Structure formats: structure tokens, C-alpha cells
Amino acid sequence: MRGLASVVAVVADLSGAAGVAVPLLCLLPDLDASATAQTTPCHSRPIISLGPLLLAAPEPDMYGVLAHEIAHHARPDTWQRRIQRLHRLAYGLTGLTVVGALLGWPFPPAVTLAAVAGLALLAARWCQRREEYACDAAAVAYLNQLGLPGLDYITGALNAATAAESPWYARLGWLWSTHPPVQRRRRHLKRR
Ligand SMILES: [Zn+2]
């Protein structure tokens, strides 16, 4: 298993390639061999949380996962703003539907509000999946910039994630989730 210091060095190299501040690294046991990107209102530094198994993952997979998370911090936040607006719309309409039900509004308006809320949530999920595709592509570019085979590394990281994906998710579950199934992500990268 490699030490955290070597992971910090990889993250610093990738951050340089992406043109972002080096994120704070946080070890979270629940994440296993994956990682997530976050921000916090407490300070301006981006954060990447990673699972301990990533420290033992093959080097290309570790590079691939970290490059993808750095892309989340480096990319313009156009999609993020859209996603936040759609979430606000969905939750606002859901609240209105509940209030309407409590006040005894007639059935058709309540159903319409609930349906629009559901559609807004699905649209937000669609935007989040677009963001995942875009981060995969950006990660390939950062790795290439470092002289590494970006496409191979990201494809390898996606292959490693396949085991954690249920057949149900790969077939239909992804439709209302934030991440596309691994197979689609691989196809999307190849089409670029
Ligand atoms: Zn992602």
C-alpha cells in the first residue's frame, strides 16, 4: 500500500495540469476504492475525500479516480448552477404539492405540480450525468498533459468500478441517478 504522501504528490501534479488549487485530502473508510469532490462554506479550499482501498489500487486506477475528482473542481460550474436551479424547482414544487394536499386542492393541479417536480428532478439527474461524462473527458486531458496515457487510465479506473455496479443499476437504475452506468461512460469516452 502506498503512503498518503505519494497520493498528495499525484494530486498536486494533477491540480497543476488542471489549473486549480491543490485540494485538501480527506480519508473516509466508507468510500472503499472510490473518491468524491466537495467544497465547504468554511474555507475556500476544494476537498477530495478518498477511500483507503484507493491507496492500494494499481497506480493507473488511482490516477484515473483522482483526475476525475479534480475535474469536478476545475470545470466551469455551468452544469452545477443548472442542477441547483432544477433541484430548487423540484423541491419547491414538491413542497407546494404537499401544502396543496393539506389544503384540499383539487386533484388535477396537485398531480400536475407533482409531475413537474418529478420531471425537474429527472432533468437535474440528466445534468449530473452530463457532468460525469465531461469530467471523464477532462481527466483524460489532464493525464495526457502529464505525459500519461489518459484514455487508458480512465478506462482502467472505470473497469475497476464495474464490480461495484449492480446489474439492475446498469440496466435501469441509472435513469434516476447522478452517475451513468460504467459501460456508457466507457462508450462516451471512446466516441470523443
Ligand atoms: Zn464524478
Image (cartoon, helix red, strand yellow):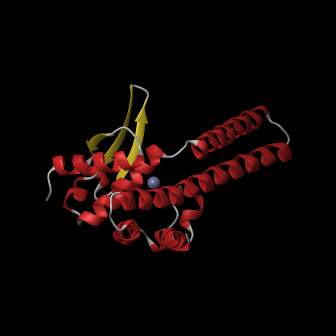
Q: What is the number of callouts on the image? A: 0
Q: Residue furthest top?
A: 42
Q: Quadrant of the N terminus?
A: bottom left
Left of 26 or right of it: where is 91? Answer: right
Residue 101: image quadrant is: top right
Q: Nearer the viewer, residue 184 or 88?
A: 184
Q: Nearer the viewer, residue 60 or 34?
A: 60
| Residue at 77 percent of width and 44 percent of height | 113
Q: Quadrant of the C terminus?
A: bottom right
Q: Nearer the viewer, residue 96 or 177?
A: 177
Q: Position of residue 139 (x, y in %)?
A: 42, 57
Residue 107: image quadrant is: top right
| Residue at 41 percent of width and 43 percent of height | 19
Above or below, 160 relative to 24:
below
Q: Position of residue 89 (x, y in %)?
A: 69, 39
Q: Quadrant of ligand 1?
A: bottom left
| Residue at 67 percent of width and 52 percent of height | 123
| Residue at 53 percent of width and 57 percent of height | 134
Q: Position of residue 39 (x, y in %)?
A: 42, 36
Above or below, 155 relative to 13:
below
